[in-house]
Image (spheres, rainbow, N blue to C red):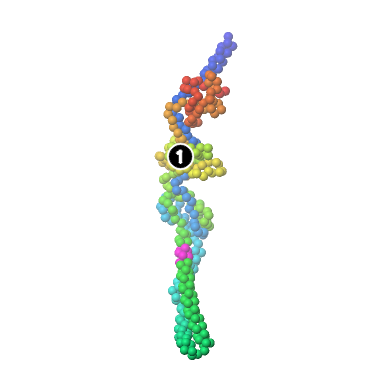
């Protein structure tokens, strides 16, 4: 008798299990989303670099300080640019002196031009006097040719010296301009020993201490917005084609367990990261948490589409991506929207069609 009851119980359990594995499609609201990993970063985050080498003299700020644009952050020591600035100033003064004629360069050429003009004037008088005599058949041909040659040589010499003067003057003016540029550049370089903030923001990290050697390659600090944070997301390349600006984002941060924050997609970076085959997507909070720190991590779901009153079945009931088991055997269905649990059925079965879970 006990054996009979045992087999009856087994049959009842088996029958219940089969009933549980047979369901009808249901109409529900369906939301499709794309998963992404999340890292929180301040807006306008950048690394502070020096554009001159030297030794760090003083840190004028500390981590956590709020700074304004053009606020002095670091002071660097290096005497070389100051010496270069002094040398550039001396070169500028010398170039100006040469150009203004106080030195012997232009004045000596002017003296040569004056002497050449006097000779030209004298040779001109002698030539035209000899020419008149020659026209009256007075004097020899040799005398006439000699006076003419001296006259032409004197004229040509005046022209050459005048060209030399103009060319030298232009060269000296160019030298003045070049020296002026070099001097201005050297002054800018000396000012670069005080490193200033480019934005209104917050000091999130300082990487160097006073006394350390500074170069142009290594950052001194990290500065970003004190109040505005960006949600950086990594999206798989399979899903990136479905991303668009202003899509809704649901964010779950590890530091705020079981709380969901909303955001909107603000930027999609077109270049793929070949290392992890993902694309970078940014979003902004609609209402951010009161406290945020750079580097907070979590996960997000980017809402792709939402449909109401759609016919759905559990994804676990699908066979080979597009078939379900019914009382009439395997039936091919057309699917649409889907999430982690359910998938939309566009055609192939109705809400009155029983489907069975695959064994």
**Local secondary structure at mark 1:** loop
When the figure is inspected, residue 91 is found, relative to residue 217, above or below; the finding is below
> Splitting the image into 4 quarters, where does residue 96 fall?
bottom left
When the figure is inspected, residue 260 is found, relative to residue 162, above or below; the finding is above
Residue 104 falls within the magenta-colored stretch: no
Q: Where the N terminus falls, by quadrant?
A: top right
State whether the magenta stretch is mostly helix, strand or loop. helix
* Horizontal and vertical percent position of residue 268: 47, 43
* Horizontal and vertical percent position of residue 308: 42, 29
* Horizontal and vertical percent position of residue 209: 50, 54
Q: Nearer the viewer, residue 201 or 302?
A: 302
Magenta stretch, residue numbers: 180-187
In the displayed image of the protein, which residue is found farthest to the bottom?
A: 138
Which residue occupies 49% across, 56% down?
50
Which residue occupies 47% across, 20% down?
352
How many badges with numbers are in the image? 1
Q: Where the C terminus falls, by quadrant?
A: top right
Q: Nearer the viewer, residue 208 or 233?
A: 233
| Mark 1 lies on residue | 244
């Amino acid at each position: 008798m006990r054996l009979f009851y045992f087999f009856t119980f087994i049959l009842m359990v088996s029958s219940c299990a089969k009933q549980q594995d047979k369901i009808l499609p249901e109409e529900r609201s369906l939301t499709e989303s794309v998963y992404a990993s999340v890292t929180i970063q301040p807006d306008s985050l950048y690394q502070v670099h020096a554009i001159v080498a030297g030794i760090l003299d003083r840190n004028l700020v500390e981590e956590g300080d709020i700074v304004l644009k053009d606020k002095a952050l670091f002071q660097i020591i290096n005497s070389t640019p100051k010496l270069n600035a002094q040398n550039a100033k001396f070169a500028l003064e010398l170039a100006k002196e040469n150009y203004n004629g106080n030195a012997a360069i232009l004045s000596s050429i002017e003296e040569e031009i004056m002497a050449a003009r006097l000779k030209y004037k004298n040779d001109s008088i002698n030539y035209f006097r000899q020419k008149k005599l020659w026209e009256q058949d007075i004097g020899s041909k040799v005398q006439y040719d000699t006076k003419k040659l001296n006259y032409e040589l004197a004229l040509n010499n005046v022209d050459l010296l005048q060209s030399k003067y103009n060319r030298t003057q232009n060269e000296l003016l160019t030298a003045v301009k070049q020296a002026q540029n070099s001097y201005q550049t050297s002054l800018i370089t000396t000012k670069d020993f005080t490193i200033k903030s480019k934005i209104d923001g917050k000091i999130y990290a300082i990487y160097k201490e006073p006394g350390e050697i500074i170069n142009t390659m290594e950052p001194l600090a990290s500065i970003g917005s004190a109040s505005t944070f960006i949600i950086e997301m990594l999206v798989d390349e399979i899903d990136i084609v479905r991303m668009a600006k202003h899509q809704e984002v649901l964010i779950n941060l590890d530091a705020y367990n079981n709380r969901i924050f909303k955001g909107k997609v603000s930027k999609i970076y077109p270049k793929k990261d070949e290392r992890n085959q993902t694309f970078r997507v940014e979003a902004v909070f609609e209402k951010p948490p009161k406290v945020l720190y750079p580097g907070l991590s979590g996960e997000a779901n980017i809402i792709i589409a939402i449909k109401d009153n759609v016919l759905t079945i559990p994804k676990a009931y699908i066979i080979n991506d597009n078939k379900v088991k019914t009382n009439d055997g395997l039936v091919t269905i057309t699917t649409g929207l889907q999430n982690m649990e359910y998938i939309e059925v566009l055609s192939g079965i109705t809400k009155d069609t029983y489907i069975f879970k695959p064994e």
